[in-house]
Image (cartoon, helix red, strand yellow):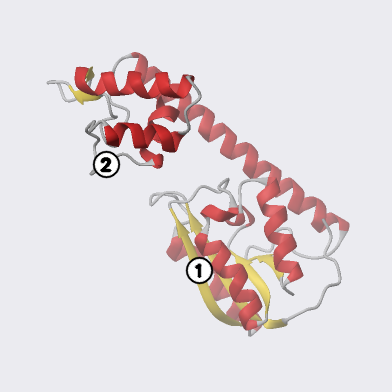
Amino acid sequence: MGHRKNKKNDPAKVIGYVRVSTDGQDLGPDAQRAALDSWCEARGASLVAVFEDRGISGGADLERRPGLLAAIDAVRVHRAGVLLVAKRDRLARDVVVAAMVERVARRNGADVVSADGVGNGDSPADEFMRTVIDGAAQYERSLIRARTRAALAVKKARGEKTGGNVPFGYRLGADGVHLEPRQDEQETVSLVLGLRAEGCSIRAIADRLNAEGRPSRGSRWHKTTVARLLDREAA
């Protein structure tokens, strides 16, 4: 989409945004911040503030991106003319989310700019490049998710631990690799699935489990823990 002529803030004031989904990715937070600093230094611009989202997927909705929301708000507060990212895919790996961010930033008087220079500008070619980059980032994210699901499915079929904490309903076997069902927790899993099939809400299920005193892996059952259990069983 092209850049509409909305009110413009000071182009010498820049708000930076950094996103990393994992600690081990190549373009880590330090590298991204360095790219933002270099871009501003080369143009005599002031990097007023930098906001981060760590461990956040590029496909996450805006309400799950506190750093990005804070950056957009800072654009308005400081009347900054630029919302700067190191690369376009740091903004989002979802076409809709990227478009929403760009629209809101523009409404607040700022342009979304990539420090690597790709897709910046107002020409039809720049607009096309932004669309291509956003689409390619979304496609790459989908591929990563598909590969991850396939790998986890193979491990699950083998009865192997799939990383992180041992899921509710299981315990780690003596070999330290394979999972074994825990009968007491499996009964709770069956109850949760049955209640959900009957149309109970996630909150109602959590309340039922707590009322019955069924042990959880934490202090008590919450909507989030029930939702995670249902998501895992559905997968």
Mark 2 to mark 1 CA distance (whole Å) = 33 Å
Query: Which residue is nearer to you in this view: 92 or 34?
Result: 92
Residue that badge 1 annotates:
51
Q: Residue furthest top?
A: 157
Residue 105, by quadrant, is: bottom right
Question: Dot 2 surroundings within 10 Å: few (below 14), some, or many (20 or more)?
Answer: some
Residue 158 is situated, as x and y percent measured from the top left of the image, at 32, 14
SS of the residue at dot 2?
loop
Residue that badge 2 annotates:
220
Question: Dot 1 surroundings within 10 Å: few (below 14), some, or many (20 or more)?
Answer: some
Residue 87 is situated, as x and y percent measured from the top left of the image, at 60, 58
Which labelled disc corresponds to residue 191? none
Q: In percent of the image, x 39 and y 18: which residue is there?
A: 154
Q: Is residue 172 left or right of residue 156?
A: left
SS of the residue at dot 1?
strand
The amino acid sitting under disc 2 is: Arg
